[in-house]
Amino acid sequence: LWANVPAGPPDPILGVSEAFKADPSPKKINLGVGAYRDENGKPYVLPSVKKAETILLANKVNKEYAPITGEPEFTKLAARLAYGEASTPLNENRIAVTQSISGTGALRVGGAFIARHYPRENRRIIYLPKPSWGNHTPLFRDSGLEVRGYRYFDKDTVGLDFKGLKEDLKDAPEGSIVLLHACAHNPTGIDPTPEQWKEISEIVKEKELFPFFDMAYQGFASGSPDKDAFAVRHFVSEGHQIALAQSFAKNMGLYGERVGAFSLVTGSPEERAKVDSQVKIVVRPMYSNPPIHGARIVSTILSTPDLHRQWEQEVKGMADRIISMREKLYDALTKDFATPGEWGHIKSQIGMFSFTGLTQPQTKALAEKASIYMTADGRISMAGLNSSNVQYFAESVHKAVTG
Ligand code: LMR
């Protein structure tokens, strides 16, 4: 029956983990998927998360279904974290918030809602940065949107192609949707500066583009959740009715719990209620209602002042460890091995990833000869490096570069 189904290619990101697992080398390193590892290379369950789980256990919570759009306490707190306590639309009850299956689910529900209800029918075109997270294109295509790109990465400077970005947004058909990475751009680790965000906001306004933010790393870029929410909050304060996808995978280390939120800023509480009712109609046939455990962990942390403070320190701890790895790697490449090339971007890039500039043949050689795994575009998850493997990594990169 299924003989003619063509075999599909491995996932460009998650497929790397499969190749890593199959490699028997004791020296192997997985720098593919963006999942935090501690200084010993082990997955890290945040102590604040463990405490929240103890509280939940003691409270003997039941396992009833959540409402279609999720646990109300969770959606309220998630929106407050993203938009800030002082947010006008939040305080005016104008933001429709839905709990989602992490960031991917938020983008997918958002994509599906927009494909169905965005009033500019001939503008269901979404512009993604070039490059963007590998899952963005299939995800939005499967949601029913047309996917196009705007320039983002400048190969020559290994920085932001701000001129190209502005030109492409100005050339986009009026009313198109534009996907913006709120902070810690994946895969490049290059973010616009606050001044540049302000300019982007102006263009988006002039062209009446519809801004859809993906915020998968709030707190992970700078170590401060408020600072990392700058772009989102700036756009909202400028009157943009944004869409937002949030994830708690990275900043609370809740990867497999699949906790996120999709929200849409609307014009009035009445509009919000109507949007809410339609989001339910999108969600119900997809998965009925979201899982509850992770959302309760997030709610417990965000609603308990001591735990909230503890979590902020822990997220900063993760961000700081990554920053220290950037320095170690930079020093090893430039000082210990004098590897040809300009490596300053390793330090200036931000968040979980570094876009190394390694070519596809070099990444292939690293996997085959050194058992070091990364995505084919040369992106490395900085979190996979630690004091025990950074020298080996730098040495292997040196060998791959010098051939
Ligand atoms: C990544 O980019 O590595 C993460 O966002 C994990 C994923 O699902 O791809």
Image (cartoon, rainbow, N blue to C red):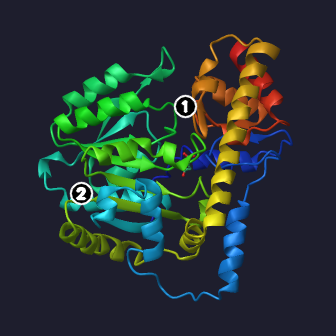
* Residue name at image x 71 percent, y 29 percent: 366
**Dot in front, 1 or 2:** 2
Q: Quadrant of the C terminus?
A: top right
Q: In the rendered structure, are the residues bearing label 1 and label 2 in contact, judged by CB atoms less than 8 Å apart?
A: no
* Residue name at image x 50 percent, y 43 percent: 227
N-terminal label among 1 and 2: 2
* Residue name at image x 68 percent, y 59 percent: 310
* Residue 255 image offset from top left, x and y in percent: 60, 59
Residue 24 to residue 171: above or below: below
Residue 347 to residue 120: above or below: above
Q: Quadrant of the N terminus?
A: bottom left
Nearer the observer, 282 or 403: 282
Q: Amino acid at mark 1?
A: Asp
In this figure, what is the number of numbered marks? 2
Secondary structure found at label 2: helix
Q: Amino acid at mark 2?
A: Ala
Residue 301 to residue 385: above or below: below
Nearer the observer, 73 or 186: 73
Give the side of residue 324 with respect to residue 258, left or right: right
Nearer the observer, 330 or 308: 308
Query: Which residue, given by chain and number where applicable, does mark 1 sit on?
Result: 377
Residue 115 is labelled as: 2
For disc 2, the neighbor class at 10 Å (few under 14, some 14 to 19, many from 20) is many
From mark 1 to mark 2, how far is it between C-alphas? 30 Å
- Can residue 107 be seen here? The reply is yes
